[in-house]
Image (cartoon, rainbow, N blue to C red):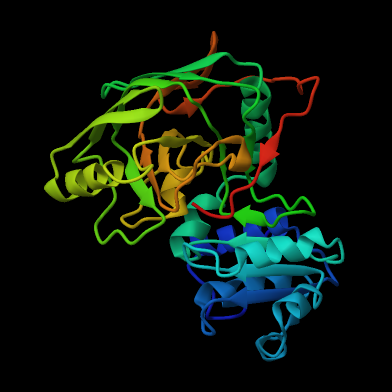
Amino acid sequence: MTRRSTDEARPPEPVWRGVQRCVDEYIGIKPGQRIGIVAAATESKPARWLRLAAQEAGAEIVGDEELSHLTLYQVLESADTIVFVDGQHSRNGSEVVDALATGKISADIFRLFDAGPEVFELCFAVPASYLRELNRRIIALGVSTRAARVTSEGGTDLEIGFETRFGWIDSCGRYDGRRPGVLPPSEVATFSLSVNGVFFADGSLNTNFAFPHDPRLEAYPVRVEIEDSVIQTVHCENPFIDAVVGGFVAEGAGSRVGEVGFGTNTGIRRFVPFTSHINERYPALHIGLGSQNQGDRVGWNYPLHLDLIANNCSIMFDETVVMEQGRYVIGHVPDPQRAPETGYVDTV
């Protein structure tokens, strides 16, 4: 449904369409609902855009002044839907999950990371129904797959073993009643003790720590050799990036593969020049080093995380082609007989 706003403060049209789709399809605002937008910055433009779109959808906005005097638990009880508008990191992720675990919170809870014009323009260009079905198909196929093969013209040649004891992460912004829906969409991810070969990351980096540099890798790809999910060598022609990635893998569990991720947001057609979930959601393989996504299933963890993201690759699950030169081609996959174990990651 196309709506027109008379508010002159709304963003340019491509961004505004993304804001509307975020509110309509991903958050799922209905007329008459009360919605609270909790922003890290009081004068957050993205928060104002979300409020405006929610008002046009017929929602009642819980005001900033009212929310500012409430405890976190009271905020979660103050509306039918609560949206936390964050930067790259969650301000109170564990507290929100703990509150939901009580079973006393009836509101739908969402987190929107990296809120800004680029997120709305790029990450909400595709209908929610399409991305959720794509994620479902990849996970349904993945749980019965023995091994994935990933190749690229740049030089990637990886074999990734899958095990049923490790769960899958479905990050498509869906609120499941237990954990917040995480936006922007979307990716699927798992864990593997058997990642072997060469990975040529020519897309971007993403990190959960400060990275004061353009993370895009098209001009300076990072080449890593991996054996049994441990980085053996790192090489990049850019001295700064080479030092950052090389230094990361030299410390603690930074050399371990903690995530095998597949960005699935087919609406993202370019990488952005700053660390962002946008780059991680790009449709390609990314290998996450450091912190892992399986919790107690794995006997180690690490507080830092660094994603190496491909640009254009081909992916096979056993004998089934999933992606061909950067384009998802996976057909219909029936649901598995047993529902796969799924996990949750609050942020990168």
The location of residue 89, given as percent across then percent down, is 49, 63
The location of residue 15, given as percent across then percent down, is 51, 62
Q: Which of the pair 49/255 is nearer the observer? A: 255
The location of residue 193, given as percent across then percent down, is 48, 25
Residue 20 in view, yes or no: no
Residue at (35, 34) in percent of width and height: 311
Q: Quadrant of residue 187?
A: top right
Q: Which of the pair 322/108 is nearer the observer? A: 108
Residue found at the far front of this picture = 299
215 is higher (above) or lower (below) than 44: above
Query: In screen coordinates, is 105 left or right of 297?
Result: right
Q: Quadrant of the N terminus?
A: bottom right
The location of residue 130, given as percent across then percent down, is 65, 38
Query: In screen coordinates, is 67 left or right of 201?
Result: right
Query: How many numbered marks have been drawn onto this rendered protein structure?
Result: 0
Residue at (34, 37) in percent of width and height: 255
Query: In screen coordinates, is 145 left or right of 269?
Result: right
Q: Which of the pair 203/267 is nearer the observer? A: 203
Residue at (82, 69) in percent of width and height: 80
Residue at (41, 43) in percent of width and height: 290
Q: Which of the pair 112/74 is nearer the observer? A: 74
Residue 15 in view, yes or no: yes
